[in-house]
Image (cartoon, rainbow, N blue to C red):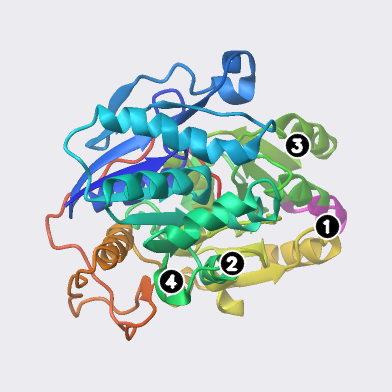
Amino acid sequence: MRILLITKIFPNAMNPGQAPFNRRQFAALSRYCDIDVFATIPWFPGASRFSKWSVSNDAPREEIIEGLPVRHPRFLYLPKVAPYLNGPLYAASMLFELARHHPAPDVIVGSFAYPDGFAAVCLAELLGVPAVVKVHGSDIDVLSQQPAVRPALEWGLRRATRVVAVSKQLKEGVHALGVPRDRIDVVMNGVDRTMFRPRDRGEARAALGRSPDRRLLLYVGHLLRDKGALDAIAAFERLAPAHPDVDLVLVGSGADEQACKAAAERFGDRVLLTGRLPHDQVARWVAACDALVLPSHHEGTPNVVIESLASGRRVVATNVGGIPDVLSSPALGELVAPGDLPALAGAMSRAAYAPYNPEQIVSLAGCTGWDESARAFYNSILAARGERPMPVPATEMRPVLQLDGAPPSSRRWAPPPGSRRFPEATQLGVGQA
């Protein structure tokens, strides 16, 4: 089977840390089928003059990423001018690219509901092949609230052969937009369990030059207001006077980085901004922390939460998106309402001192690897083609794919010995989820 994956949330040579979840899942998916990736780049006249759009402007037209052949076609995009046209313009741009692309795909997958998923459905209908749309979070929670976009977003989702959501909450959001539940599958993201695993906290702190006697709270992600980076600092301001042995570290970069730096200055070395880091360094900071803090205003299923739990670290997060699906027990962490700074400060204070067993966190969370996630995704693609799913060996215990209309499996698949592993991205990237 040959699959064409279309998405604007994918890495390129100029932005290698973007959307690592798609990179890892698609690379793992290539074990089961032939894959071509159109990792698209928005373009409009004068785009290079705007920093937001110029990052990927110089990306090569073609490259190989983790063994995947990746093209970077540009698509005509009209930011904030006529968003209802972006789906049709995207589809028209990809039709031209597809006309030069052989052989034709058996399935087209659009990762992100609009305009990517919309375009995937348009192309699939022209070719007479199934279309699968993968939704991540803000494409359902945010874009569906925009009157200019919602009709086209609904059209694409309703005409997709199958929709893949990364959380149960997103599945319900897709259903509310008119898609029957029996055409929506829940496929959770995976985690690299060779990198994110329980490690000695003291050794990790020593490697980072941190004191073993202080408490450490960690934020990992884009430094954006909507991701809660400024909320984390504001909540820390509330708890800092009463807890002088607690520090806060923020790993990542983003549009609100300068605002975060300005807010952090008054705390001296108690609040550290590291900037964007290689993924192995992110894993070390996770190992060094007492708890992860992610006070997002909206989310899909953020991988950093899964990575923290796989590392045996508890989490303080907001009860949005798929986070409650992951933090399914109070033993794993604490949930607060988005924007509730007093509640966030209280939860952070408790998390800094709460004793827990990292191995028990890992066992209770039951995080899966990227191979399991990719296999579940592949089974959803098979379902779109009307084919039976691949059998699940008896070595795994919990499903990562939930297919409505069929009894859920109580087991999970594990990769065979010697299966191909995929190298990590060189930089942290938290995608549009």
Local secondary structure at mark 3: helix
User: Mark 4 = which residue?
Assistant: 359
**Residue at x 56%, y 19% (from the top left corner):** 54
Q: Tag 1: Cα neighbours inside 10 Å, few (<14), some, or many (≥20)?
A: some
**Residue at x 45%, y 49% (from the top left corner):** 117
Mark 4–mark 2 CB contact (< 8 Å): no
Q: Can residue 33 be spotted in the picture?
A: yes
Q: Residue furthest bottom?
A: 407
Q: Position of residue 409 (x, y in %)?
A: 30, 82
Q: Distance between the residues labelled 2 and 1?
A: 35 Å
Instruction: Mark 2 or mark 1: name the one nearer the start of the chain.
Output: 2
User: Mark 2 = which residue?
Assistant: 173
Local secondary structure at mark 2: helix
Q: How far apart are marks 2 and 3 (CA)?
A: 32 Å
User: Which amino acid type is marked by label 2?
Assistant: Gly
**Residue at x 74%, y 42% (from the top left corner):** 270
Local secondary structure at mark 4: helix
Instruction: Mark 1 or mark 4: name the one nearer the start of the chain.
Output: 1
User: Mark 1 = which residue?
Assistant: 239
Q: Tag 3: Cα neighbours inside 10 Å, few (<14), some, or many (≥20)?
A: many
